[in-house]
């Protein structure tokens, strides 16, 4: 009998720490859990983490900063859910998130997680930048405010405030303009979609964000949404309907794929590049979209598309999920998953590592610098690659 009320009390004891969940789909490398890859300690693997959670909720283990770090080091990448053979496998990430919710309720959080949540609460973004500046990413671009156009382009927190992701957001907006898409943006009215807030276990703040966003979208009669980030895509597509927010949601690679198929965007310049694509967890394992980004790249003249050994369902997470792009529990080592991933990309012979997520973009760009691979590998968002070729 648990001392602390815990949502998965009837299930968590069923993990017997076989360790299958550390492997990728081809069983090729035991380090496909990014947290375990970084620390190589059982407590950072799925099974070890579940056993620690169980001990904590049963009162056998005291809360500590270290325990909280282990619980928050999970990126929510879902590799474990692909590999665990037990019937509860689809609940593995939920079990970790539920433990975080318990920590939030007791106010027992690592400082960086507290900072993330406070910033979202106060400013609507984790960076702590004034909400008034949210539309500044557009720079010289002339973009319309959303006012009933066919699509809302939801840029997200990274696209709005991270300088590198802002470039991608501008590039994508230009591409959409070039293809004649009718779209508008929310500018300073836009707020966090809540995906990472939910992953960090702050259910109350998540619900508040969702309800406010749904109110804003419905007031403006939004029907179709294009997202820059797969994290926003996931939240709008899979969580907002639970709160009555029903929209047609597209990740931008799906829109680019359609535009290329219809002939609205055409390859004009040969790119002559060897490219491998890093699957973002929130597009891939969370939403099974492996095709659109690859089809977009394959459609461009002169591109040779290569695959890393770990790809699609078996891809290694860059380490940025579940708020880790901000809290950085997996950084600072050559075993950081982003650094492992760029070494893997170079090994394919690729000179470009293509991404489709602003978190992956900054994580992997930083990793290229940390590895000293700047002369061998460039990280580019798919929108940038398409923009250069069309
Ligand atoms: S989560 Fe599943 S695969 Fe992983 S250790 Fe537990 S039982 Fe084994
Ligand atoms: S979701 Fe990813 S990081 Fe978290 S335990 Fe599973 S494999 Fe590891």
Image (cartoon, grey):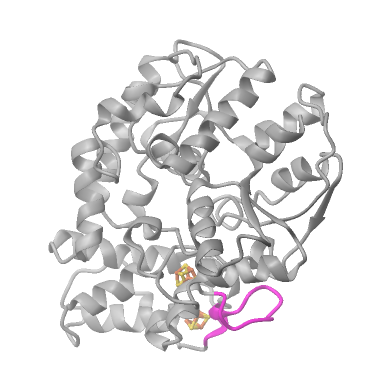
Task: Tell me, yes or no, if residue 176 can be seen here.
Answer: yes
> Seen in the image, is 187 located left or right of residue 388?
left
Image quadrant where residue 353 sits: bottom right
Residue 116 in the figure: left or right of residue 311: left
Q: Which residues are magenta?
A: 19-32
User: On screen, 40 above or below 347?
Assistant: below
Q: In the displayed structure, would residue 282 be above or below residue 36?
A: above
The N terminus - image quarter? bottom left
Q: What's the magenta bit mostly, secondary-structure-wise?
A: loop
Residue that protrudes farthest toward the left in the picture: 106
How many marks can you see? Answer: 0
- Across and down, in percent, residue 320 comes to 45, 59
Q: Where residue 264 sits: x, y (%)? A: 77, 21
Residue plotted at (60% across, 35% down)? 252
At which x and y percent is residue 303?
83, 47
> Quarter-wise, where is residue 45 in the image?
bottom left
Residue 160 magenta:
no
Q: In this view of the protein, which residue sits in the foreground, 31 or 167? A: 167
Residue at 29% from the left image edge and 46% from the top image edge: 126
Q: Residue at x 20, y 75 (%)?
A: 65
Of residues 87 and 246, the one drawn nearer to the viewer in this rendering: 246
The quarter of the picture where residue 74 lies is: bottom left
Quadrant location, the C terminus = top right
52 relative position to 104: left or right: right
- Please state the horizontal and vertical placement of residue 28, each as a whole percent of the image: 69, 81
Above or below 145: residue 61: below
What residue occupies the far front of the structure in this picture? 375
Q: Residue at x 46, y 19 (%)?
A: 222
């Amino acid at each position: 009998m648990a001392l602390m009320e815990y949502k998965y009390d009837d299930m968590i004891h069923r993990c017997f720490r076989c360790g299958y969940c550390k492997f990728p789909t081809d069983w090729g490398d035991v380090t496909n859990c990014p947290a375990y890859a970084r620390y190589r300690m059982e407590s950072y693997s799925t099974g070890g983490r579940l056993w620690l959670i169980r001990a904590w909720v049963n009162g056998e283990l005291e809360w500590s900063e270290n325990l909280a770090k282990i619980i928050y080091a999970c990126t929510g990448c879902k590799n474990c859910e692909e590999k665990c053979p037990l019937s509860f496998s689809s609940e593995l990430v939920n079990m970790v998130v539920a433990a975080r919710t318990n920590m939030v309720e007791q106010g027992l959080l690592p400082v960086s997680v507290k900072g993330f949540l406070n910033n979202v609460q106060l400013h609507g973004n984790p960076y702590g930048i004034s909400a008034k500046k949210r539309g500044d990413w557009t720079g010289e671009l002339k973009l319309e405010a959303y006012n009933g156009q066919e699509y809302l382009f939801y840029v997200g927190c990274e696209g709005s405030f991270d300088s590198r992701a802002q470039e991608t957001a501008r590039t994508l907006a230009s591409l959409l303009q070039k293809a004649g898409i009718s779209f508008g943006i929310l500018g300073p009215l836009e707020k966090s979609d809540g995906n990472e807030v939910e992953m960090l276990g702050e259910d109350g703040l998540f619900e508040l964000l969702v309800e406010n966003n749904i109110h804003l979208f419905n007031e403006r009669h939004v029907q179709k949404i294009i997202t820059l980030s797969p994290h926003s895509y996931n939240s709008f597509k899979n969580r907002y309907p639970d709160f009555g927010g029903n929209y047609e949601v597209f990740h931008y690679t799906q829109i680019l794929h359609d535009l290329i198929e219809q002939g609205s965007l055409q390859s004009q310049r040969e790119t002559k590049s060897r490219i491998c694509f890093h699957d973002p967890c929130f597009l891939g394992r969370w939403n099974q979209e492996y095709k659109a980004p690859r089809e977009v790249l394959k459609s461009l003249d002169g591109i040779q598309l290569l695959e890393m050994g770990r790809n699609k369902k078996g891809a290694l997470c860059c380490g940025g999920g579940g708020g880790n792009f901000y809290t950085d529990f997996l950084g600072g080592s050559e075993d950081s998953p982003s650094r492992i991933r760029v070494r893997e990309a170079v090994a394919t012979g690729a000179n470009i590592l293509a991404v489709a997520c602003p978190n992956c973009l900054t994580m992997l760009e930083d990793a290229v610098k940390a590895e000293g691979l700047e002369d061998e590998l460039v990280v580019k968002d798919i929108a940038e690659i398409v923009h250069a070729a069309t």
